[in-house]
Amino acid sequence: MTSMIHPTAIIEPGAEIAEGVSIGPYSHISAGVVIHEDVQIQSHVVISGRVTLHAKTQVFPFVSLGSAPQFNKEVIESGGELIVGSGCILREHVTVNVGTPKWGNKTTIGNNCFLMTGAHVGHDCHVGDHVILTNHVSLGGHCILGDYVIVGGLSGVHQFVRIGDHAFVGGMSGVENDVIPYGSVYGNRASLRGLNLVGLKRRGFEREKIDELRFAYRLLFADEGSFNERVEFVAEKYNDNVLIHNMVQFIQKDSTRTVCMPAAK
C-alpha cells in the first residue's frame, strides 16, 4: 500500500515515511522524523526533530510533537528525541516535547495510549502502555507513568512524580507526590483515597489477589509504627503476591518525591 500525502503537506528531505501512511492538508513533517506503517496524520499537524511514530498510531489536527522543552531560560538544549509507540491515539491539540541531554535525551510514550484533547507530556517523561490522559491533563517534565494508568481531566502532575501501574487519578487533581501502583488519588492537593478496585476487576486480576492487596493496603497505611516498618512487614508477609510485590518495590525505589498518602482524618 502506498502512502497518501496531501499536496499541501510539507515533508522535508530526510524524513522517513513508511508504506500505508496518510498525511493530511497543511501538516509539516521535518527532517529526522520516522513514521512507521499505517500511521494516520490528519491536517495541521507539526512533527519536528527526532521523532519516531510506530505503526497504526493516529494523530489528529493541531497536534505538536517533538518541539523543544519548555524551559524558562535563554538557551534551550536541543537534540532530544521522542518515541511514540504503536496503536496510540493523539487527539486535537496534544503537545509532547523531546527529552534533554542531562536526563537521557528521550521522551517516550508506550503502545496503545490514548491522549485526549489538549493533553501535554513534558520533556523526559516516560509513559507506559495503555495509558489514558483525559482532556487537558498536563505532565510536568520527568514524570514516569506505569502501564494502564488513567489520569482524569484537567489534572496536573508535578515534575519528577511517578505513578505506578494501574493507578487512577481523579479529575481536577494536583498530583505532587508519587502514586502507588493500583492506588486511587484525587483532590487538590491529591491524596490517596484507596485502591483502583474497578480498574483491577476490569483487567481480570484474581479476586484472591485483590483481597490480599486490600489487606496489605490497610496494613501499609495504618497508624501503628513507622511507614518504613509497615512496608518491611508487608513485603515479608505477602512476598508471593505479585501485586503487593510491585507496590512495595515502587515504594522502596529511590525518588525525588514522597509517596502520596491518605488524607488526614
Image (spheres, rainbow, N blue to C red):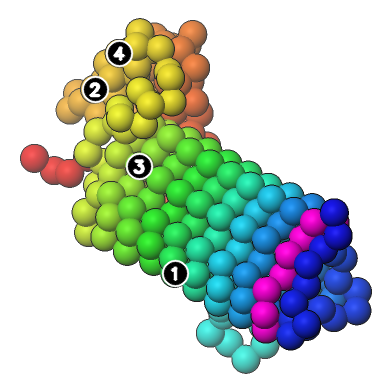
Real-space Cα separation, disc 3 to disc 2, in angstroms: 18 Å
Q: Which residue is mark 4?
A: 211
Q: Which residue was labeled with disc 2?
A: 218
Look at the numbered discs 4 and 2 and tell me whether their residues touch, using CB distance below 8 Å: no
Asked if residue 205 is positioned above or below residue 11 in the image, the reply reads above
Tell me if residue 9 comes above or below residue 35 in the rendering: below
Name the kind of residue labelled 1 in the image: Gly
Residue 247 colored in magenta in the image: no
* Residue at 53% over, 41% down: 130
Residue under numbered circle 3: 168
Would residue 163 be visible to someone looking at this image?
A: no
Element carrying mark 1? loop
Please state which amino acid type lies under the numbered disc 3: Phe
Q: Secondary structure at mark 2?
A: helix
Magenta-highlighted residues: 18-26
Q: CA distance from mark 4 to mark 1?
A: 37 Å
Q: Amino acid at mark 2?
A: Arg
Q: Which residue is mark 1?
A: 118
Kindly report the distance in space between the C-alpha atoms of the residues bearing marks 4 and 3: 18 Å
